[in-house]
Amino acid sequence: MKIAVLGTGYVGLSTGVCLSEIGHEVICIDIDEDKVNRLRQGFSPIYEPGLEQLLMNNMNAERLHFTTSHKDAFGKSEIIIIAVGTPQQEDGSADLSYLDKAALDIAAHLMHDAIIVLKSTVPVGTNERIKKILLENCREGVKIEIVSNPEFLRQGSAIFDTMNADRIVIGSECKEASEKVREMYLPLNVPILLTSTRSAEMIKYASNAFLATKISFINEIANVCEAVGANIEEVAAGMGKDKRIGEAFLQAGIGYGGSCFPKDVKALLHTVKSFGIDFFMLQETVSINEHQRERLVIKALNRFGQLQGKRFAILGLAFKPDTDDMREAPSINIASSLTSLGAEVVAYDPVAIENAKKVIGDSILYVNSVEEAAKDADAVFIVTEWKEVKQINLSKLTATMKQPIIFDGRNCFEEDNIRTCPTIEYYPIGKPFIIIKNS
Ligand code: NAD
């Protein structure tokens, strides 16, 4: 099929690349010229494992093209996928202005009938709103149908997730349009669910709200474990074996972040409010997450009394490993709390430093290795569980620190490993701390 994708962010680019990989002819459009120029040279503007290889393969096979011109892109496209951002506004609602603009761009340039697929995460009713914009602005005689097709990929494994989706949700009131979109995805050979438009929109929000709540739940259980002397990893393993609960999303830590959970949960709360109803549990999910982000700083305050003049290393800045995305990363809160309490902060991340500088600014120092960050530090804060962080040689690292103190927000190390250190103070999440003193 001939497909156009609007927006080459995490979702649009992964979708475009994967649809070309399964044989479709795909053209991706973005208003960001720099992005498009880099993509045309085969460079991905985002860090995603496996992405650049597929990008090159499909560009070389001439199945994948990039442009800034909507006119060029819609030429022959049967399906136009919208994957522009829907960021959070101050009141928590989703900002639909990029989407409205994308609909107007389509209407202005579309000369033939097409199916418009809305992949961006949007509040219930948005597909109807976009359809209205299209119908009011498209050229006379041009017929469009709209299909809701929310995306569930995870950053850091976007390509794998797209090629091996747990399910693809296709929501529309037009059976032929749903069928056509189903046909587009058939080569992926994954479960496909056809629903109404509003159900498809709700499935996305309900899924993210549930996952965020599962994270906040396990983080609260971790805090209880700390108080009562249990071990969250043993507790989560025991819970996860129950098929009704499942093992995924039971890793306690310092809270969820990223471009989706925080904004989608808040957008759902905003929708709920606009319908005059309450969702008390989801409100708690948000406040638990906000508290959890401060967990390591509270542990540091308990340990040191006050943080003025201390030198701390933050290991990992991205909101999770295998991505350079800093949106809503817990590192932002931790860096800000530590500096406002008078500490000097030195941070390292394998790929997110440039993005971190844009958000955190120059209130902290950025360095190029774990070792540089930890040298002479009063404590290390582990914020993102990058593979290279999990593989740290703790004995060697702590030997270079001013004080061998580690606050681990991601429970990166086994007890046996920690106990090989001649001297260490190790404070994890939801497990007993370990103190080994050099006698
Ligand atoms: P992003 O901000 O990374 O990318 C959006 C892209 O759209 C940008 O490159 C921007 O330049 C481009 N754009 C904006 N207006 C345009 C227009 N009129 N024409 C062409 N391009 C335009 O966003 P993202 O992270 O890919 O998210 C896109 C949507 O998918 C959001 O609604 C998000 O909530 C949802 N989603 C994201 C993820 C994720 O993990 N990032 C997962 C599932 C769903």
Image: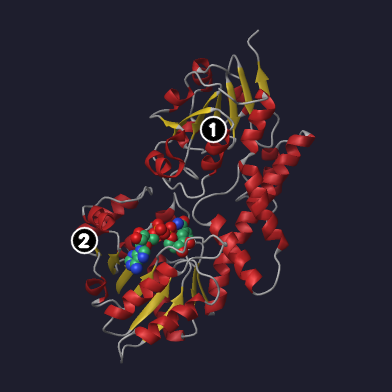
Q: Disc 2, ligand 1: is the CB inside 8 Å?
A: no
Q: Using the rendered view, name the quadrant where residue 431 is placed.
A: top right
Residue shown at 43% from the left, 67% from the top: 189
Residue 246, position as x, y percentages in the image: 65, 53
Residue shown at 39% from the left, 70% from the top: 82
Categorize mark 1 by other alpha carbons within 10 Å: few (<14), some (14-19), many (20+).
Answer: some
Nearer to the camera, 301 or 428:
301
Q: Using the rendered view, name the quadrant where residue 212 is placed.
A: bottom right
Q: Contact (CB < 8 A) between labels 1 and 2? A: no
Residue 394 in view: yes
For residue 30, side relative to residue 219 (left or right): left
For residue 55, side relative to residue 331 (left or right): left
Helix, strand or loop at mark 1 = helix
**Alpha carbons under labels 1 and 2: distance apart:** 51 Å
Helix, strand or loop at mark 2 = loop
Q: Is residue 134 above or below residue 55?
A: below
* Farthest right residue in view: 228
Q: Is residue 60 above or below residue 314?
A: below
Look at label 2 and name its amino acid: Ala
For residue 128, side relative to residue 60 (left or right): right
Look at label 1 and name its amino acid: Thr
Q: Where ligand 1 lies, by image quadrant?
A: bottom left
Q: Mark 2 = which residue?
A: 61
